[in-house]
Image: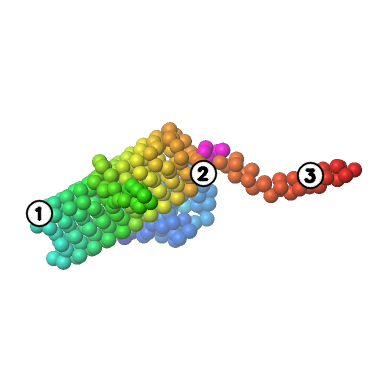
Amino acid sequence: MEKTLQELAAFLHGTLENDDPAMRITGVNGLVEAGPSDISFAIPPYVEFCHKSRAGAMILAPGDRTLDRPVIRVDNPKQAFAELLELFRPQEEVARVISPLAYIAADAKIGNNVAVQPFAVVESGAEIGDNTVIYSHAYVGRHVKVGADCIIYPNATIRENCVIGDRDILQSGCVIGGDGFGFVTNNGKHNKVQQTGNVVLGDDVEVGCNSCIDRATVGSTVVGNGTKLDNLVHLGHNDVVGENNLFVAMVGIPGSVTIGNNNTFGGQAATVGHITIGNNNVMAARCGVIGNIGDNQVLAGFPSMSHVEWLRQQSKLRKIGELMKTVKELKKEIEALKKS
């Protein structure tokens, strides 16, 4: 594919600077990988170094540095880059057929323009919405409802009675509706508590590879519209997660946690169970939240604290070696003074 800079600027609804009518853009790439016929993008703090890239053209925000090459100015360069990736590298189209090698229960309801690949399983009472793609070896359990325009990748599992919204993406190996971790201990023996609820995913939810969202003991484990889970994320039974949250890899949320909207959990962040987290918070990587959290906070450390306070503590911890050395010297001086 080839596009002129004018075509790309129109596609992105951006403003073109330093146009080169002879230039043809043939690809989209990162700052380091891009070549003379590629277009790339930069956001702070990388804007300062984008002039070193070999990219023939750049996507920048209004007010960012000027360059000696074509620049398309847009309000959100990262979003523009994502749109160009879809333009230049569209996903391979999947044939919208139901393979005779797939198992589809006789009473399952399959919508229009659905693809079900070989060895996928759709159990009794399941409903699949229009334009959904189910890849090989995916499992859709009894009475599951899957919305329209979903993608269910190989080896994804949706257990019985769960509800999947529209335009959801379930990556390979994820499990929606596995049993919650519920046990009663009697006389030293752990006895399983039946998990009778389900999982309800909103629209535009993505669940990463090998992530697990446990079914509720009773009621529903809920994930709101637009929330995204990275790989190896765990949400426990009866969690209620709001909209547009981000869970980076290896986040662990135990049971009965209520989370508001627009929160970000860094890698390996975790909480205790039975707490409430508000809106617009950021939990840094490996942050450990042990109590209720309000709104608009940036937290770090274990137990979690203000990110600013955590940075102060870390700067002081780095000086412990010097402080110990000073203490030893002072002890020697004190002993000498005592002897004299």
Secondary structure type for disc 1: loop
Identity, as a three-letter code, of the amino acid under mark 1: Asp
Characterize the magenta stretch by its predominant secondary structure.
helix
* Residue 337 percent coordinates (x, y): 86, 42
Q: Which residue is mark 2?
A: 302
Query: As drawn, which residue projects farthest toward the front?
Result: 187
Query: Are the two marked residues, 3 and 2, in contact with CB atoms closer than 8 angstroms?
Result: no
Estimate how packed mark 1 is, as few (under 14), some (14 to 19) or many (20 or more) residues with alpha carbons within 10 Å.
few
The label on residue 330 is: 3
Give the mark toward the camera: 1 or 2. Answer: 2
**Could you give the CA–CA distance between mark 1 and mark 2, rounded to whole angstroms?**
51 Å
Q: Which residues lie in the magenta part?
A: 305-309
Query: As drawn, which residue projects farthest toward the left?
Result: 106
Residue at image x 13%, y 51%?
A: 125
Secondary structure type for disc 3: helix
Q: Which residue is mark 1?
A: 107
Estimate how packed mark 3 is, as few (under 14), some (14 to 19) or many (20 or more) residues with alpha carbons within 10 Å.
few
Quarter of the image with the C terminus is top right
Given residues 299 and 239, the one toward you in this image is: 239
**Could you give the CA–CA distance between mark 3 and mark 2, rounded to whole angstroms?**
32 Å
Q: Is residue 90 left or right of residue 281?
A: left
Query: Are the two marked residues, 1 and 3, in contact with CB atoms closer than 8 angstroms?
Result: no
Residue at image x 24%, y 45%?
A: 197
Query: As drawn, which residue projects farthest toward the top?
Result: 294
Quarter assignment of residue 265? top left
* Residue 47 percent coordinates (x, y): 50, 48
